[in-house]
Structure formats: structure tokens, C-alpha cells
């Protein structure tokens, strides 16, 4: 951590700061210039609240040198985290395909789609039971019945299930679910993150629409610090001024997050673009950029899907895409 | 709602759409051009899912004409909502001052600040007991003990209390609290919003950092639709590329939200800017623009505040500001 | 174009609007609902200024149905534009590699890099002579001498040259240059665009950091409307809240722009990310997503480049990347 | 400037860096920690290109401590710059009102509006002769004839004229103009900025839609470094995800820019919001926040304005607003 002092800092306040840092076992190395003094802070500064220092009258600016996350940091865990779930491995170089409908609508629908996506190469079934919707008047998912149908689909196909949890109080309902998804709007629902840290379930953590890589890694840190090492990072688009796409898919997150962290990175081109016509090319781009997995909305009848129809692709389109994804990854080996 | 069809739409799909709309009691008025057909949909389209229509192959685009919120909409409730709490009125033309520390730190601290801000003209005491922090390692608030101290401060000063609730499961702890704050990161925590809709407590709903006016009003709609009419909208900055300020304070939300809705609009210049030096001018700007209230962080000793020190102003600065705020509002009457 | 009227519009103003539209040979189809009247406007509305209509007291909102660009619109030019320059074809399915240093520094440097990138598969040499720099104190390029050296490098290698023009008055200096680049900061320098419309030179038009796809296509329209059909669109990142990367690379622009327009789409991963470590994966992603070309900064000695060193890759890294790019494109054929 | 080195930096490269800095007369103070070495650089680092250092293999990060602008920096010019033009003073505590139509349309129109806004308290007439329009098909202004009519309006009213210059080649046409406006889209048109630096004309420099405070001050620095001290900074909204307003007006720029710089700050609520109904409250907010001036679009007949009608207010509304603006500023004295 680096502390930049204002010109002519008050001596007494300066001493006060130095004493306080000493108490915290932080070594201080001052660099005194004609117009400015800079303090280099050495030691475990992750416990030093940057806000406390910047609030001091004598301080002009404070800059972190170390990342504020530890458990999620690749520096301290150089090798890739690989998460095993239902016979599938997520992370470490493979490309896991997760596919399924935005929301579970009926037994026939979810089992039908599960069989189709499995045949095409998916190894995880996704599907919403509890749906976070912007409007209170929109379809909110089949809820508990949806969970039951997802488990039936797992029974029928052997595919592990990934579905969204909206609140810590729902945890008992998700006991048999394989991967708990935290939606973008809940990425900083710290109560939920803490509760998930106490489980050992794999968590697919979606990046919030206004959240930086560091914010995402700090939310992962909440879960990891709780003792649960099974976190999968997921990019699903950030909010920008561009309105042609639903959000702006930030694929540079793939090499960036994989540099900063050891956690697997999965891309959701369906929610990011909001347009099925853009899903295949963005999925291929993510595969070429080294993503550990893709989560794709597939619906047997997109125009009649109960939600997110415009961004769902058909099982046939998914099959074609899966073939191309394999081709791209093979070409890059 | 307006549906724009692609050139040469498939007849059978077209008929299918028309039949479906008829079932929903929506009248359809087509406008046929050389290259394009436009359908004007008349009736209660708030129950029509825009996504279902845009997913159809024959549809190029769908545009809403009516706002998707009803209870929050000024068109259906022309007069201002005024919320009474602890002898204070929020909304309807007055400027309510809510002030207090970022977090409760001790009995002495919270009662001391409460007395100071009351003397300066504040009529609501704010203070955090449960603190949502980006880092799991940062101070998370005094929690239940913080709630107890806030109630002591109310006893000592008569000021009603506004404090943040992070999760629906905490509701019993907030039984005696006057105004429940929903933080920006929880603005689309729909489980929490639904739970708050079942209470009759005033809710201060903060705009999410990537949320539009419409998103904010849709989240208010969740609470209103649940039966709780006491929603206060709060702007606290949106996330942009500018990094000098913590966030970008969007003051145009004041006249905009007051045009679109009848709910009171409160501004939080402290979290928006993250710099105490900017708080007074932004508070004055909000007052001049017609805000219904301000929520301002005041701390007796900002450099030693346990959180958000850099954006807190002192009681003396608050008193000076409060005088100027009154002068501005009087000048505009 | 669709005009949504306010409730109970003034009859006289309404008639005035209808008369004005008639004069412009626009047919009007009204849809009258209980609360709202919608006018469907049919005809060539590209000449109707949307602002003029929305300014009317009786109008609540105006929505465009047709895109406001014609020459750039794929609807009116279904087949891909392919631009021939110095023996290379840009657009129409091939992947053109443009590579070279951020700025020309010496004859030896530019000819050395030109030879290296040509050997690796590049068919266009890029290099800056006039450099737009945020700071007036930063290196501004070798200017006229830089142009001269670029032409020497063309002579030595046969590679056509792409370099940035900053001002219409520079046009005479660029007479022998093959592709004129318009930088992101000049994308809406309409004086420059008009001047380029009068030439027949290929123009590489970079998307501005706050510009939507439509803005980009409207700027292309300026050049096309002037009579120059040779426009290449280039994405180089938009500005968002994320600071880890220099900008946010928006790869969804590839399928989007190719749907909306017939013009070739080239991606610049170097400026978008600002970090050489991210360039290869983003280049591969762009190739997988169907880009028509890539423009990549290559420098023999990045740490000593006179500008943009952090985002330049070495000739060796470029050669390795070029091989992978070919593999990806072959895998997708 | 602070340089953060990677763990175990290569000795030879390190020595190379130290030698290079020594040559530039930069003193280096190293702070060696267990995992990290930090170099504090002392001296005139404004001439050190941050990119050159960050490109080095041994460097993890570089952070500037000093602002990269000098002439625009309040640290080196503590007192406010006050610009005199046509009998009016801009900067230093007064609130200058600049008003007029988006574009000059006729002699009668411009003189009529000039008289009206002067009567209401404006001391500068604004009006567009050359109009930068997103669409090549939109009205591009009356151009030279517009300049002529503006000068007639000055003759008739004595008001100094502010109008937009789009290109350095237009300078001769603007010889008699009092204030040259640089539009947001040209804020980083460095050719134009350099040309303006050679004049001594007051320049109203509008902030680009994706430009930070620092970017704006660096563009001002281009003009100041050229020898022209007369720069007025102008905020007109930045581009964000919010679409209800045309742009997001960032009023926190007022106290921020006035802290960072000595240059006057003027606010344009008309272009920022794009809605006339929002202009008065945003103008009042800017006045309360301490703006040095306002530039407001006033049109005698907004619905028939040739451009930007939706954001223009009438002379009557301007008069009412001007009264309130004076009241707010008096209340704050």
C-alpha cells in the first residue's frame, strides 16, 4: 500500500499515523520529495482499511499495491481450481457445456431438452425454477415444483443440475441440486454469499452488471473465506450505453480473471447478448479465448418460451454449435 | 405496445400471433407499408410479456408505449405520495434532512451525533447496524447491538431511525425501526422486495449502480404491488468510467422520477461522491433541483470513522450546510 | 416511424402535424386507444427529423422503425462489401491481418517489423506517423517523415500501408497511403468524414469510445454518402467502469454490425485491452466470431517502443498467433 | 510516480531502468518488502512516459502521483482564471448566462432571441452556424451566413457571441467571433486544439461523452500549452446506460474541476438532458453547486426549431429561470 501525503503534513497527525501502522505491524518506508512525501507500507495490508487512511487530513491519496483478495488470488494458489460435479470437471483446460431452458416449464419440456443437450455434448443441465424478474408481473418460475422437475431430468439423463438460488432461506430446497447459481443482481447480496460459504456446494457466481473484475473476485472471496472452495466465475455481460445488445459481453475477462485468479471462468452468451442470433458467434469467441465453460439457453420452442425466448437457441442449433466449439478447441491444442 | 414485423411475414405465424393477442383482449391495429407492417396493440398490455413477442420469427422489434409499472406511475396517481414517520413528512414539497454516521460505533457516538444533527435541523437519524461491505475482511457493522443503540438514540432525541436491512430473514430485528433502507446492491433482490411489500414500513429504496429509472420504479413496484405504499426512492450515484468520484451522481433523476412517479425522491450525496469536500455542493444542487430529502453521512471524527470516513462531514459542517439548504429552498418558493 | 401522442391532443396541433407530414409524402395510419393515440408513419422517413416531431407539445414519444442510415444498411445492399487494396481483399469471409508498430520510429525499425509481420502472414502494414496523444507533452509521432518511412517499407515489402489521418488538411500528405485510418476520437469529426467522402481511398473507421453501433454506421454513412464506398468498420473497445483493461472490447459488434451492414468489420485487440498479454486470446476470439480482419500492434522491442509499448506483442508472438488464427478459421470452415 | 516491481526482478533490467531514470534527473527511492519492491520516483515526472515504464518485463504496475497537466493545474495557479469578453467576466464567482438557439435560422429569429435573452439577463449569445450532426442528412446549419447573422445580432444587442468551430481550417471565418466553442465530439481533435492554442480567443471546451475530468483537463492543457490562457470548461453530459435523458449530467464536476483547476466551469443542461422540462431544475442545481456559468438553448418556437427543439426552452421560461437563478445565488452569498 502506498500513502501519498499532502504538502507540509501536520507533524502530530503524521506521528499518529505512523504509530497506528506500527501497532498493525506494518513497516513504513518514506520517500521525501520537494513537494511530496510518499509512504511505502510493507506487511500484511489486507487488514488495513484503505478508507481509514484516506480520511486523514494529511493524506492526498492511497493506492493499493496488493489485491485485496487472498483466497481467490492466483498469486497464492498458482494452479487452476478444478471442480468435480456429477462426473464432470469444470476448470483446468476443458470446455464444459452447460445448457438448458431459461425456466423449467413442464416435465416433458425439461426432460426433452435435457436429453437433446446431453446428446449434443452438454454435461450440465441448466434451468430456472426461481426466476428473478425485473417486473413483479412477469412469470416468476415454477419454484419448488421446478426444482422437483429438474431432479427428475437428472434422474432421466444423469446430467448434474445448475439452478439459481435467490435467497439464503431457500437453501434447504436446494439440498439435492449440484450447482447453485447466484444471479448477477445478487452478486453483492452478502447475506447469500456468506450462507453459501458455509456449504460445500459448487457455486456459479455471475458477475453483476456494474461490477469490476475485482468486485467479482471479492464476492468470490466471501464464499471462499467461508470455507467453500468451489466457486465458478461467470461473465454474462455488463451494462453500457450500447442498446442493440441486452448487455455488453466482456470477453477480455477470460484471460484477465484467469491471470488474477485460479477459479474457473464460464461465459453466458445468452443473457449477455439477449439475441439468439448472436449466441453462436459469441460462444465460439469465448471458446477461442480459453473459457472453461459455456452456459447457454436452449429451448425446444423459443417463440413460446415462458421467458427469455429471444435469446434461446434450438436444440438443433445447439448441436451444430457444439460441434464447432469442439473444432475450435481442437484447433488450438 | 407496437410490434414491427419483418418483411413478408409468414401468414400462419401472423394469424397465430393475432389469435393469441385476441385471447388476451388486446386490440390490434395494423399499419401496412411498402416494406414494413406495424401492429399497434391497444388494451392492458402490462400483462403481455414483451419477450414472448420479440422471440417470434416474424417480429423484427417490439416497443413498449406504456410504462410497465402501474402502482408507481404518476399517470394513475397524479398527486404526490407523502410518507409520515415519527412526526416528519417525506414528500410533497418539503426537504427532509436525514443524517448520521455510516455505521453505529458506540452509544456515546450515535447519541452524540443524533443530538448534533437534530440541533442542525435533521428530522431522521441514519446509521448502519448491518453493513454490506465489498470485502469480507472489512468491518461488517455492530449488527444487533447496533440496532439497540439506534433505538436508544431515538429515545434520547425523538428522531425516527433509518437503517439498512440486508435480508428478509432480518425483518423481526427491524420491528421497531422506522424506515428500512434497501441498499443499492440489493435493489433487485426480489426476495427482499417481496418481503418488504408485505410490511407497511416506509422503505428507502436505493437505486442500483447499473439500474435505470425504469428499473428503480419496477423494484418500487414490487413493494407497492405487495400492498406497501410507503416507498421512498433514493439516488446514490451510478457507475460510470469517471473515477475521480466514487460514482456519478445523476441529479436529473429528481425531475425525471417526479414526472414518472408520485413517490418521494431523496438524494445521497455522500455515497455518490465518496468525498466529503463534494458533499455540500451536491446537497445544495439536489435541494435546488427539487429533491424531497437528503441523506447525509455525518461523523464526529471522520478520520477515525470505522467506515466511509472520506465521505463523512462533521456536525459543524452539517449545521452550516443545513442553513444554506434552507436558504436555497426559501429562495425558490 | 411511430409517433405516440399524449392523451387528448390539441386538435389544431394535430392537424398541423398531419399537414406537415403530408407535404413530406408520408402516409399516416392512426391507432386510437382509450388512453393513447399512435400514428404509424409510412414512407421515406429518413428525411424526417425525429427531433422536430418530439418537440411538439402533443407528442409523448417518437420511435424510429427504420434505421437512419441507407448506404451502410445491409437491407439495401445484401451482399458483403469487399475492398481491394494492394493485392489484398478485405471483407467477404477472409481474415485480413494488419500489423505493425504503434508509431514509426526509424527506417530500420519499420522495415524490420514490416518484413517480420509479412513473413508471419500479415497483408497490411500499420504504423502511426501522426499520433493523437491525450497529453500535449507525449511523443506526437514522426509526422511527415513517418509517412516517408512507411512508403519505404511498402517499397521494401510490397505491403499496403494503413496509417492515421488526423485532419482534412493533411489529405495531400496521404496521397500515396493505401488505407486512411480515422481514430476513435475523430469518429464524429464530421469535417474530416466529409473530406474523406470525396476521396475514393479505403477508410478504416474506428468506433468512438462512447459510440453505439448506430453512431458508427452514421459516421460511415457520412463517407458513403459523399461517394466513397470503401469503408472498413473497426472496433477498438468502448469505455466502461472496468479499469483492469484500457477499454472494454465489444466483440458482439462483429455479428451485430455484419447483420446491420454490408461493410467489413475489423477488430483491434491491442488498443481495446491495452495489455499485450490479452491480445492473443482476444484476437482468437475475434477470429472465431467471424471478424473480417485484425489490426494488431507488433513491435520488435515493446519495452522501448515510443508509445503503446504495454500493448504491443513481439514479431515472434505475432507469428505464433497468426498460426493459431489460421487454425481457428480453418476449423470453422 | 510509483513503480511497483514484480517479485524477483531481473537485476540487469533493474539497473537499466535506474540508469535511464538517472539520465532524466529522476531520483529513485526503493522500498523493499518481502514480496514486493516499490520505487518512489521524485522529480519532474511529467516528462516520463508512463507507458514506457509499464511495458518493462520487471514492472507490475505504475501509478502517477502528480497530475499530468501543469498549466491547467490549480496547484500551480491557485487563483481563479477570469476571462473577459465583450464586457462580461467569466469565472471568479459570478454566474454568466449564455443563451440562444441551437442554430441560427434567420436574421429575425436570431436578433429576436438575442434581445429576449439579453432582457432576461444573459450576457453572452450562443447560436450554431456550423452544426455537427450525427446524420449526414440532418440540417447542417446556415454556415457562413449563420456567422454573418450572429454578428448582426451582436451589433443589435451588444452581446458577445459564442459559436462552434468544427475544424482548424475554419479559423479565418471566426475572426470576429468572441468565444469559440469546441464541441464534445471534437474534445480530442488535437489538430483543432493545437490551432486554438495559437490564438488568444476564449475557447469554450466541451467535455467529451466518454472523457474523464483528467481527459478534459489534458485537452485544455493542449490549448494552454500553446499559449492561449482563455479556456472555459463545459460539462454537457456523459454517456451512460440511462436512456430517459439524452446523457447523464455530471454536476459533481463543478466542485471537482474547480479543485483540480483554476479554469471557469460552465454547465450545459440543454444538451445534457435533451428534454426542456428538465432544463430549469438542472440549471438551478448547477447554480447552487457553484457553476461559473450556464449555456442554455432558448428558442422562440421550440416545436419548429430546425434542430434540438425538444431541449429548447422559450424566452419566457428563460426569463423566469433567470430570476430563480439570481435568487439561488443571492441566497448562497
Image (cartoon, coloured by chain):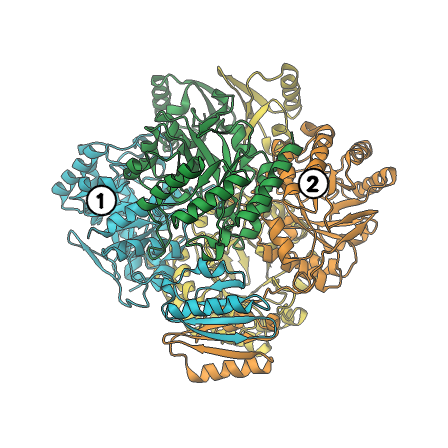
Chain colours: A cyan, B green, C yellow, D orange
User: Furthest-left residue in view?
Assistant: A155
Chain for numbered disc 2: D
Point out residue C253 in the picture as x, y percentages from the top left corner.
46, 49
Residue pictured at 69% horizontal, 40% vertical: D329
Q: Is residue B212 visible?
A: no
Point out residue D312 in the picture as x, y percentages from the top left corner.
67, 33
On the picture, is A36 further left or further right than A149? Answer: right
On the picture, is A288 further left or further right than A37? Answer: left
Q: Quadrant of the N terminus of chain A?
A: bottom left
The answer to which of D227 and C70 lies nearer the viewer is D227
Circle 1 residue = A117
Point out residue D149 in the picture as x, y percentages from the top left corner.
82, 39
Separation of disc 1 and disc 2 at Cα?
A: 67 Å
Q: Is residue D174 visible?
A: yes
Classify mark 2: helix, strand or loop. Answer: helix
Chain for numbered disc 1: A
Q: Quadrant of residue C318?
A: bottom left
Q: Residues within 10 Å of mark 1 (few under 14, many from 20)?
A: many
Q: Quadrant of residue C5?
A: top right
What numbered label is drawn on residue D329?
Answer: 2
The answer to which of A247 and C16 lies nearer the viewer is A247
Circles 1 and 2 in contact, beta carbons < 8 Å: no
Amino acid at each position: 500500500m502506498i500513502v501519498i501525503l499532502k504538502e507540509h503534513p501536520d507533524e502530530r497527525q503524521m506521528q499518529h499515523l505512523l504509530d497506528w501502522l506500527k501497532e498493525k505491524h506494518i513497516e513504513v518506508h518514506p520517500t521525501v520529495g520537494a513537494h511530496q512525501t510518499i509512504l511505502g507500507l510493507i506487511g500484511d495490508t489486507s487488514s488495513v482499511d484503505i478508507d481509514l487512511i484516506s480520511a486523514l487530513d494529511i493524506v492526498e491519496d492511497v493506492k493499493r499495491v496488493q489485491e485485496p483478495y487472498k483466497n481467490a488470488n492466483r498469486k497464492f494458489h498458482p494452479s487452476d481450481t478444478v471442480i468435480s460435479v456429477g462426473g464432470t470437471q469444470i476448470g483446468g483446460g476443458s470446455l464444459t457445456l452447460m445448457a438448458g431452458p431459461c425456466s423449467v416449464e413442464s416435465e416433458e419440456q425439461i426432460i426433452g431438452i435435457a436429453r437433446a443437450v446431453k446428446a449434443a455434448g452438454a454435461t450440465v443441465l441448466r434451468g430456472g425454477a426461481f426466476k428473478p424478474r425485473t417486473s413483479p408481473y412477469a412469470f416468476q418460475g415454477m419454484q419448488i415444483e421446478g426444482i422437483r422437475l429438474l431432479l427428475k431430468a437428472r434422474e432421466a439423463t444423469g446430467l448434474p443440475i445448475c439452478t439459481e438460488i435467490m435467497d439464503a432461506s431457500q437453501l434447504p430446497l436446494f439440498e439435492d441440486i449440484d450447482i447453485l447459481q447466484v444471479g448477477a443482481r445478487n452478486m453483492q447480496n452478502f447475506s447469500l454469499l456468506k450462507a453459501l460459504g458455509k456449504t460445500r456446494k459448487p457455486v456459479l457466481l455471475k458477475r453483476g452488471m456494474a461490477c469490476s473484475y475485482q468486485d467479482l473476485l471479492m464476492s468470490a472471496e466471501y464464499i471462499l473465506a467461508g470455507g467453500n472452495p468451489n466457486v465458478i466465475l461467470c461473465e454474462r455481460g455488463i451494462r453500457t450505453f450500447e442498446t442493440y445488445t441486452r448487455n455488453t459481453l466482456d470477453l477480455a475477462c477470460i484471460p484477465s480473471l484467469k491471470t488474477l485468479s485460479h477459479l474457473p471462468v464460464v461465459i453466458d452468451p445468452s443473457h449477455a447478448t439477449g439475441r439468439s442470433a448472436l449466441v453462436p458467434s459469441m460462444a465460439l469467441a469465448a471458446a477461442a479465448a480459453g473459457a472453461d465453460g459455456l452456459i447457454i439457453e436452449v429451448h425446444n420452442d423459443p417463440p413460446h418460451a415462458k421467458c427469455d425466448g429471444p435469446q434461446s437457441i434450438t436444440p438443433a442449433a445447439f448441436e451444430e454449435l457444439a460441434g464447432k466449439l469442439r473444432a475450435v478447441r481442437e484447433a488450438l491444442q
